[in-house]
């Protein structure tokens, strides 16, 4: 089992990945699950140069990570460096970081059941074929930043922003209930074969 990520160093993260995947080298890890680990940020996975499938669901990942924070040690959600609470950085200066290093290999990414409220930091993932974002906090189509974040993903064939299966009711993302949601997404990403389980 992968140890909970906290303020350990990058070599410790790599050791945890090796142990959980039973690989002697993170460069030969093709599939990795960091689901339900209380992560508040995307860890730096630059050493996983061949990673194709990454599962980060059921964490505390927010819409973004303050620039520069991705290189600092990870802390569980809710952890601060000192006892004084710090105000959140303005959203305009924050984004999902840590995924750019996987641009040449990542094909499947699961970010469902987190606290993402705006898409940023995904446009570099040019090989991404499947993206799961159900049960986040994407309140409007504007939060998807279609032209800057999703349109550049030319290999994207499957995008999930809500569950359409009756046995799995969930609040989903409010953007999915906006008038013109489906049309806007399909216009921005015309190569999509699957949007929320249907075309």
Image (cartoon, rainbow, N blue to C red):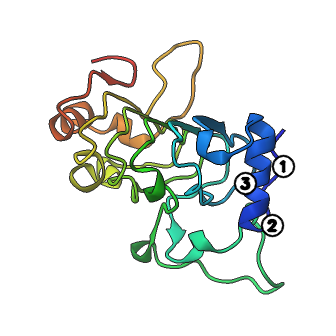
Instruction: State whether residue 21 is above or below residue 152.
Output: above
The percent position of residue 154, horizontal first and vertical second, equals 23, 39
Looking at the image, can residue 113 be seen?
Answer: no
Residue lying at 51% horizontally and 42% vertically, measured from the top left: 50
> The C terminus is located in which quarter?
top left
Characterize the local packing of mark 1: few (<14), some (14-19) or many (20 or more) Cα atoms within 10 angstroms.
Answer: some
Q: CA distance from mark 2 to mark 1?
A: 10 Å
Check disc 2 and report the residue beneath it.
Answer: 8
The percent position of residue 135, horizontal first and vertical second, equals 54, 38
Residue lying at 57% horizontally and 35% vertically, measured from the top left: 30
Secondary structure of the residue carrying numbered label 1: loop
Label disc, if present, on residue 184 of the rendered structure = none
Residue lying at 57% horizontally and 52% vertically, measured from the top left: 115
Is 124 displayed left or right of 83 in the figure?
Answer: left
Characterize the local packing of mark 3: few (<14), some (14-19) or many (20 or more) Cα atoms within 10 angstroms.
Answer: some
Label disc, if present, on residue 14 of the rendered structure = 3
Characterize the local packing of mark 2: few (<14), some (14-19) or many (20 or more) Cα atoms within 10 angstroms.
Answer: few
Label disc, if present, on residue 3 of the rendered structure = 1
**Residue in front for this viewpoint, 67 or 60:** 67
Instruction: State whether residue 185 is above or below residue 63.
Output: above
Q: CA distance from mark 3 to mark 1?
A: 11 Å
Asked whether the residues under the numbered discs 3 and 1 touch, taking CB atoms below 8 Å apart as contact, a structural biologist would say: no
Looking at the image, can residue 124 be seen?
Answer: yes
The percent position of residue 17, horizontal first and vertical second, equals 73, 46
Q: Mark 2 or mark 1: name the one nearer the start of the chain.
A: 1
Q: Mark 2 or mark 3: name the one nearer the start of the chain.
A: 2
Mark 3 or mark 1, which is nearer to you?
3
Picture quadrant of residue 55: top right
Asked whether the residues under the numbered discs 2 and 3 touch, taking CB atoms below 8 Å apart as contact, a structural biologist would say: no
Q: CA distance from mark 2 to mark 3?
A: 10 Å
């Amino acid at each position: 089992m992968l140890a909970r990520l906290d303020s350990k160093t990058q070599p410790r993260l790599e050791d945890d990945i090796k142990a959980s995947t039973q690989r002697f080298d993170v460069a030969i890890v093709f599939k990795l699950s960091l689901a339900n680990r209380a992560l508040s940020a995307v860890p730096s996975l630059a050493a996983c140069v061949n990673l194709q499938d990454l599962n980060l669901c059921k964490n505390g990942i927010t819409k973004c990570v303050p620039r520069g924070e991705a290189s600092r040690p990870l802390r569980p959600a809710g952890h601060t460096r000192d006892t004084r609470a710090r105000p959140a950085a303005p959203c305009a200066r924050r984004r999902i970081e840590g995924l750019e290093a996987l641009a040449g290999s990542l094909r499947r990414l699961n970010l469902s059941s987190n606290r993402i409220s705006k898409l940023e930091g995904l446009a570099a993932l040019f090989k991404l074929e499947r993206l799961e974002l159900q049960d986040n906090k994407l309140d409007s189509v504007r939060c998807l930043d279609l032209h800057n974040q999703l349109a550049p993903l030319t290999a994207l064939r499957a995008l999930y922003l809500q569950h359409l299966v009756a046995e799995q009711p969930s609040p989903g993302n409010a953007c999915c209930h906006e008038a013109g949601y489906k049309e806007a997404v399909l216009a921005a990403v015309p190569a999509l074969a699957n949007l929320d389980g249907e075309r």
